[in-house]
């Protein structure tokens, strides 16, 4: 069972999903702490309602000082909109979910609605999401899982976002369970660095 820190910047929809799945027994994890770089993020309010310790931290150093007070072996980025640099003992234990199929529509500036607008503008017939380990570059760490969704010509960026988020709710917990089962090194060792 993974002992997770959740980092977020916004509403906490992914936190909601994690909480529901932990309660249902389908996500093998415990949330130890929730941290946001946005002081008034709705996700922090939700974390407090769920009974999780919730903190605001402006930067990596502040986040890592907070993490030092908790027993954490996995950091889940859940709509965290900054590049995160973990402490050394968590260097290969930071997961992220990206709302596209990496290596497409990824990298600096490609997050949230920007991704779905780019997918629509390119006329893609599929999109999806990617759970990957985070490293010092946006969206370049080893991939854990990806899922595709079919798109219609009439889909708006909002339609694409809704379709992709529904799949994210399934694949992110599945990826965490897979990491718990196989260990981080399995994924780091299977890719060329």
Image (spheres, rainbow, N blue to C red):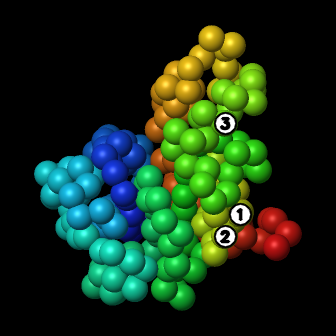
Q: Residues within 10 Å of mark 2 (few under 14, many from 20)?
A: few
- Asked which secondary structure carries label 1, the reply is loop
Residue under label 2, please give it: 137
Residue behind mark 1: 140
Crowding around mark 1 (Cα neighbors within 10 Å: few <14, some 14 to 19, many 20+) is some
Q: Which mark is residue 118?
A: 3
Residue at 52%, 21% in the rendered image: 159
- 138 sits to left or right of 164: right
Q: Nearer the viewer, residue 186 or 117?
A: 117
The label on residue 175 is none
From this view, report whether residue 102 is shown above or below residue 62.
above
Q: Nearer the viewer, residue 67 or 107?
A: 107
Of 176 and 34, nearer the camera is 34
In the displayed structure, does residue 183 sit left or right of residue 173?
right
Location of residue 141 in the rendering, given as x and y in whole percent from the top left corner: 69, 65
Is 122 on the left or on the right of 18, as rendered?
right
Q: CA distance from mark 3 to mark 1?
A: 19 Å
- Marks 1/2 in contact by CB < 8 Å: the verdict is yes
Q: Which callout, 2 or 3, points to the residue nearer the camera?
A: 3
Q: CA distance from mark 2 to mark 3?
A: 20 Å
Whether residue 92 is visible, yes or no, is yes
The residue at the point 54 percent across, 88 percent down is 88
Question: Which of the two labelled residues, at mark 3 and mark 1, occupies the earlier sequence position?
Answer: 3
Image quarter (top left, top right, bottom left or bottom right) of the C terminus:
bottom right
Residue beneath the point at 35% across and 42% down: 13
């Amino acid at each position: 069972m993974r002992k997770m820190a959740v980092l977020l910047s916004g509403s906490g929809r992914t936190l909601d999903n994690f909480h529901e799945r932990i309660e249902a027994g389908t996500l093998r994890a415990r949330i130890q702490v929730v941290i946001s770089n946005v002081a008034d993020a709705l996700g922090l309010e939700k974390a407090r309602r769920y009974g999780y310790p919730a903190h605001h931290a402006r930067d990596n150093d502040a986040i890592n000082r907070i993490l030092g007070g908790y027993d954490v072996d996995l950091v889940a980025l859940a709509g965290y909109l900054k590049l995160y640099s973990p402490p050394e003992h968590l260097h290969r234990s930071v997961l992220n979910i990206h709302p596209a199929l990496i290596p497409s529509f990824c990298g600096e500036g490609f997050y949230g609605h920007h991704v779905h607008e780019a997918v629509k503008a390119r006329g893609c017939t599929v999109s999806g999401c990617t759970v990957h380990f985070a490293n010092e570059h946006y969206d370049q760490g080893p991939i854990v899982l990806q899922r595709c969704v079919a798109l219609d010509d009439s889909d708006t960026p909002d339609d694409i976002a809704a379709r992709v988020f529904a799949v994210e709710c399934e694949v992110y917990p599945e990826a965490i369970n897979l990491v718990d089962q196989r260990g981080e090194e399995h994924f780091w060792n299977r890719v060329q660095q």
